[in-house]
Amino acid sequence: MACSKHLPQSESYLPQSDKITKATILVLDATNTLSFAAAVDPLRAANRHAGREIFRWQFATPTSQDVQLTSGLIVPAAPIARIDHCDLFVIVAGFRLKAQTTPALRASLRRLANVAQNTAGIDGGPWVMARAGLLDGQSATTHWEDIDSLSSDFPQVHVVNSRYQISGNRLTSAGATPAIDMMLALIRRDHGARLVSQIAASFILDHSPSPATPQLRNPDPQRHTRTTARAHALMEDALDEPLPIALIAKQLGIGARALQLQFRAALNTTAQQHYLSLRLLEARRQVTTTTQPLHDIALATGFTSQSSFARAYVKAFGINARAQRSL
């Protein structure tokens, strides 16, 4: 299905090309609705503010079955095997990636990526791209929950913790908000900053963080200072082998006491307690969303013994990990 909307041309937009970019947006089952919208709505807004059709898109599904998003929204079946060409190929995925990335789907991905000018993955999409061999030798990112698995499953991919990543004609992003930034970067490259500014204004998007900004598992931007946010990022990168606070401070170019004072002033806690809370929040995520043995979760979050992990978990959450998993 092709979708676009023609409106009177904005006076401030000067077309840089008469070309219409034809996009195919592949949507997998159990995709997050926000990620789905982030893939297509910037294109819709670009047409609106350009005053003409500069993007034309169609949705595709892995098979001849309808796809259901996590919200219950249905994307009607449009088998990707029947699509033979596109300029922009976008893969949007969320959950149950391995089961859906069948040999037939991987073949279709490689076929379309070979003819597309750009191929992009959103949320779980980068994992699907990597499974099809589309990210070999490239830099890529994905949602922070999947960064470790992307790195371990595909050592031939240079995995980075960033909001979005552009590596040649391969684009990858984390969740929905970074995907909007990535799509705007793509539009900016072909149609200029003026059009992107108009799109951002219509979305009330009044910030443009660097694509290289690390994803934080537990962000609290209104409370963090620049220094505590950087310390927070270093902590999240070393949950399995916690860094000494003095070493973190040294990497930030300040003294350990100065770092402690900043944590106390900004977050009303110590750096050690903040670090521990990050490790325990990640432990709870793994307890409630994976089937990993509890011993492995303890090691992955920096606890040297099952008993110390158990005590810290109960103290933090009021329930032991095994009981929480059974809820």
Image: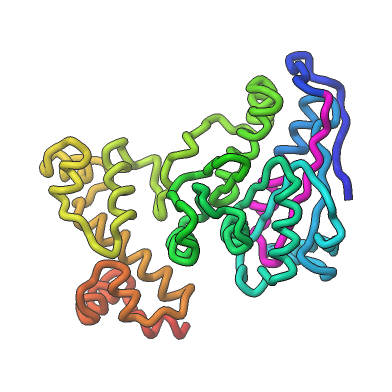
**Closer-to-camera residue (177/117):** 117
In the displayed structure, 146 sits above or below 263; it is: below
Q: Quadrant of residue 4?
A: top right
- In screen coordinates, is 317 left or right of 132? left
- In screen coordinates, is 100 left or right of 224? right
**Closer-to-camera residue (79/137):** 137
Q: Residue at x 25, y 61 (%)?
A: 276
From the top left corner, tell me how far across and down residue 7 is, in percent. 86, 27
| Magenta extent | 18-41
Instruction: Specify whether residue 145 is in view.
Output: no
In the displayed structure, 14 sits above or below 111; it is: above
Instruction: Specify whether residue 257 is in view.
Output: yes
Residue 23 belongs to magenta span = yes
- In screen coordinates, is 65 left or right of 26? right
Residue 144 belongs to magenta span = no
In the displayed structure, 319 sits above or below 234; it is: below
From the top left corner, tell me how far across and down residue 142 is, in percent. 52, 54
The colour scheme of the drawn protein is: rainbow
In the displayed structure, 174 sits above or below 9; it is: below
**Closer-to-camera residue (177/165):** 165
Q: Residue at x 61, y 52 (%)?
A: 122
From the top left corner, tell me how far across and down residue 131 is, in percent. 59, 64
Number of residue marks: 0
From the top left corner, tell me how far across and down residue 58 is, in percent. 83, 49
Q: Residue at x 66, y 61 (%)?
A: 31
- In screen coordinates, is 234 left or right of 323? left
Q: Quadrant of residue 41?
A: top right
Q: Residue at x 54, y 54 (%)?
A: 136
